Image (tube, rainbow, N blue to C red):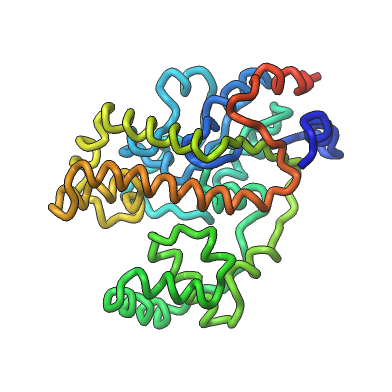
Amino acid sequence: MDNVDQVLNRMFTGQMSKTLIYVSGPTGIGKTSLSIDLAKKLKTEIISCDSRQFYKELKIGTSPPTDKQLKEVNHHFIFNKSIIDNYNVGDYERDSIDVINNLFKTREYLILVGGSGLYADSILFGIDSIPKVPIEIKNKLNLKFKKNGLIYLQDKLKEIDLEYYKMVDLNNPRRLIRAIGVYEVSGKKISSLRKNSKKKRNFNSSVIMIKANRDKLYERINQRVDKMIKDGLEEEANGLVKFKEYNALNTVGYKEFFLYFDGKLSKEEAINKIKQNTRNYAKRQTTWFKKYNDALGYKIDDNIDELLNKIPKNE
């Protein structure tokens, strides 16, 4: 990986005059704080690509920026949707590119932040030209899912597309069914189709990758979950039980409490499961982000000011 000077030099010396800086890294690693520091230094705004922080009802379990942080820097795509809204990555790409193009009329730099890799990629590279899955195939796979459980979909995907299996959310049946369906209808792996659809953007993009050793990251994750519990995650989840079938609530932190409310887990088991599932999610994110070969590596224990001082001021 390049050193700090090499990457920052490349970051701000591209042919295009506008630069989108993506602050990436696994959940709980400190992306929000770094993105705000960068935005303040560059006198700019933040675009969120965390697909769960869109939802205004999820104030605790998604660890959104605090009210204080939201006042410090203008954020876009935070609490802009309801959990009952049908909002997908294609909608997000359209909306976010409109906002970015408009902001670049008056800004030289913008900050993109969030751990939802697919949503980040939709901005950096564009949505994939992937064939639609016919309803008959979806219905067939849904029946097999209901009969054989999630393990059937996981094993099937692992068999046909190991690369995508390693990065997708294996607890999300909709994504598994889509990937399997694409293979059945086209004979092509969704992972290979995703690599052939990069769109040209009218701005530069650069990636900062925040890293930490595993023990440190897991410690931060456990501390964050403990804080969520203290802040009222159980009560928040309890107030959303009637919406638990919505895709927005197929989310770590909520689905475990739903199992507790149904008597399938004890409260202690639910909390431990949240921590475990968050760690597993962080592993998948790390795998996804490995493809950013030119990313600037940044450790959470590094001095942020040293990084900020290397970023040129706007002319």
Q: Is residue 94 visible?
A: no
The residue that appears at 40% across and 76% down in the rendered structure is 138
The residue that appears at 53% across and 75% down in the rendered structure is 182
Residues 250 and 313: in front is 250
Where is residue 218 shown, x and y percent of the image? 45, 38
Tally of marks? 0
Where is residue 312 shown, x and y percent of the image? 79, 21
Where is residue 55 shown, x and y percent of the image? 38, 41
Which residue is most to the front? 215
The residue that appears at 27% across and 78% down in the rendered structure is 147
Q: Locate the N terminus and report the quarter of the image it occupies.
A: top right
The residue that appears at 63% across and 31% down in the rendered structure is 299
Q: Locate the C terminus and report the quarter of the image it occupies.
A: top right
21 on left or right of 142: right
Residues 282 and 67: in front is 282
Q: Is residue 264 above or below residue 270?
A: below
Q: Is residue 72 above or below residue 241?
A: above
Residues 72 and 147: in front is 147
Q: Is residue 175 above or below residue 16?
A: below
Q: Is residue 68 above or below residue 132?
A: above
Where is residue 124 shown, x and y percent of the image? 66, 48
Q: Quadrant of residue 189?
A: bottom right
Q: Is residue 16 visible?
A: yes
Q: Quadrant of residue 36?
A: top right
Q: Quadrant of residue 191?
A: bottom right
